[in-house]
Amino acid sequence: MTTLSDQALQQAMAGLKTVGDCLAWAEQQLAEADVYLGHGTDSFHDEAVALLLHVLDKPWDVDPAIVEETMDPPLRDRLMVLIQRRINDRIPAAYLTGRAWFCGLEFIVDERVLIPRSPVAELIAQQFAPWIAEDEVSRVLDLCTGGGCIAIACGHAFEQADIDACDIDAEALAVCQLNIDNYKLNERVHPRQGDGLAAAHGLYDIIVCNPPYVDAQDMQALPEEYRHEPELALASGSDGLDFTRKLLADAADYLTEHGILVVEVGNSMEAVEELWPNVPFVWIEFTYGGHGVFLLTREQLIGNRDVFVQAL
Ligand SMILES: C[S@@+](CC[C@H](N)C(=O)[O-])C[C@H]1O[C@@H](n2cnc3c(N)ncnc32)[C@H](O)[C@@H]1O
């Protein structure tokens, strides 16, 4: 694995005068080290921009002419340290900056929570249409909420709805609470701790869940960057479906008559189809990328309960 030594940093420092020089240097270092991208950016350029803007304390829509400005040496040094940590320790940029974006909203993140990246954002932005009408949604459950990104985005998408944000991990829920506070959604978004559906109560119009779903083989092969994320947020048994099996067996009991269940299983979608070949999963097609998210209605969950229970 390529690393960045202090000596290489010292040499580079002398030549970096402008913000643009620093950006080009950072991008080149990230590319040469071939860091893994997959936690919010999809190019070395964007990864470098994220770290640079953090250091400059500027938003994404900053005037591009900023590249002509002189870079303050203390800020340049801070950027270099971040690039060094990104490369040598393989820490995703979001953990270095402490923030990530989901559904156009900014979230606090740290190593207690998964970095938000679920394609479910697209479904939330379209208010889960055409599968449910906005005026039918008064309660939503974000199961496996982590830092609360899905719950909070749903709070914005459905302004009248009450949202339960459940997770087994108290540490993750502490981050979720920070995000709820930031968006002043304490009245409508409620963090609850419990295993699976244990903390859920009553009936929901939508249960949306991005559970741990990485299978044992993929867990072994994950790039170093993923090792900074909580294992509890990723691993789910040999076929990646330990969590999902239980959810499918029980979810119908927590849905209203018109209720829907939306679950992300990523690469474990093949295992889902193998396990339940006759269940009519609707696999969502995303315009902006992503795969492995299925939807079932309460009726379909009830109609297939036998095969879900058999798989437990
Ligand atoms: C893939 S992360 C999803 C985080 C967030 N919803 C997102 O989309 O970015 C999965 C989350 O599930 C939680 N989790 C793992 N096992 C759980 C269980 N048995 N019951 C409830 N939550 C669980 C983890 O703590 C983690 O926060």
Image (cartoon, rainbow, N blue to C red):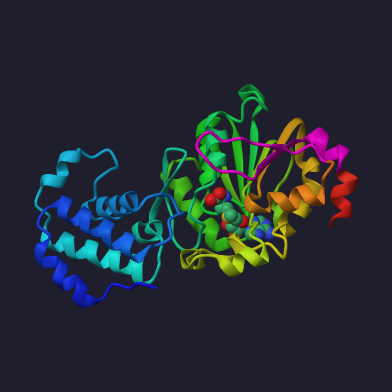
Kindly tell me whether residue 187 is visible in this rendering. no
The picture places residue 175, in percent across and down from the top left corner, at 48, 56
Q: Is residue 58 left or right of residue 115?
A: left
Ligand 1 quarter of the rendering: bottom right
228 up-or-down from 45: above or below: below
Residue located at (64% from left, 30% from top):
138
Kindly tell me whether residue 238 is visible in this rendering. yes
Relative depth, front residue between 62 and 274 = 274
Is residue 13 covered in magenta? Answer: no
148 up-or-down from 1: above or below: above
Residue located at (65% from left, 56% from top):
213
Q: Is residue 144 left or right of residue 117?
A: right
Is residue 280 covered in magenta? Answer: yes
Residue located at (51% from left, 57% from top):
114
Q: Is residue 104 left or right of residue 291?
A: left
Q: Which quadrant does the C terminus fall into?
A: bottom right
Residue located at (54% from left, 59% from top):
172
The picture places residue 43, in percent across and down from the top left corner, at 37, 50
When asked about the image quadrant of residue 257, the answer is: top right
Q: Is residue 87 left or right of residue 248?
A: left
The picture places residue 212, in percent across and down from the top left corner, at 63, 57
Q: Which residues are magenta?
A: 279-304
Relative depth, front residue between 98 and 271 = 271
230 up-or-down from 180: above or below: below
Relative depth, front residue between 176 and 222 = 222
When asked about the image quadrant of residue 290, the answer is: top right
Q: Which quadrant does the N terminus fall into?
A: bottom left
